[in-house]
Image (cartoon, rainbow, N blue to C red):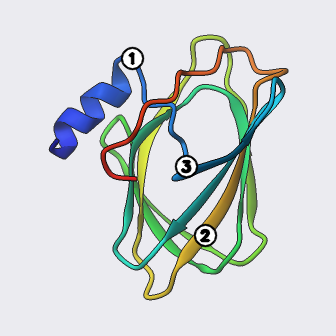
Amino acid sequence: MDRSEELARAMGPGNGMVGQRLLSETDALRIWRIELAPGERVAFHTHVLNYFWTALSPGRSRSTMGDGRVVETAYETGTTKHFTYAKGEKMVHDLENISDTTLAFTTVELKIGSANAPLPLAISPES
């Protein structure tokens, strides 16, 4: 699947695979792990739940957003960012490691307290 098809799928019904590996899921949350080698990428995915991520290593990433913007971000170990979504809101993006070292994150999605229902989990073609 090329990236335009991947983006269209994430913009439509949504790709709820917001990480590479789902480490744990309860009625309250989902805990994800992302570990990207240099040049590796997580496919376009859709965020609808309140969540936060924490960087487990330093590095840099590039994300193409659903609206076409490209965002580059630098991380230090322990960098944490929180996101909140209102009813019907979402964010679609991919994530590519543009560092020369492995980039790792833990992402926690909050199923309780979020305004939106969790998206179903589908296997991502580039996870």
Quarter of the figure that contains the N terminus: top left
Amino acid at the residue labelled 2: Ala
Percent x, y of residue 110: 78, 32
Q: Which mark is residue 104?
A: 2
- Give the structural element (helix, strand or loop) at label 3: loop
- Work out whether mark 2 precedes mark 1 in sequence or the reverse, and give the earlier one: 1
Other residues around mark 3 within 10 Å, as few (<14) / some (14–19) / many (≥20) = many
In depth, the one of 91 and 5 nearer the eye is 5
Give the residue at x 73% y 14%.
115
- Give the structural element (helix, strand or loop) at label 1: loop
Separation of marks 1 and 3 at Cα, in angstroms: 17 Å
Percent x, y of residue 53: 70, 53
Q: Which residue is mark 3?
A: 19
- Work out whether mark 3 precedes mark 2 in sequence or the reverse, and give the earlier one: 3
Q: Which mark is residue 13?
A: 1
Amino acid at the residue labelled 1: Pro
- 14 relative to 6 in the view: left or right: right
Decide: marks 2, 1 in contact (CB < 8 A)?
Answer: no
Amino acid at the residue labelled 3: Gly
Separation of marks 3 and 2 at Cα, in angstroms: 10 Å
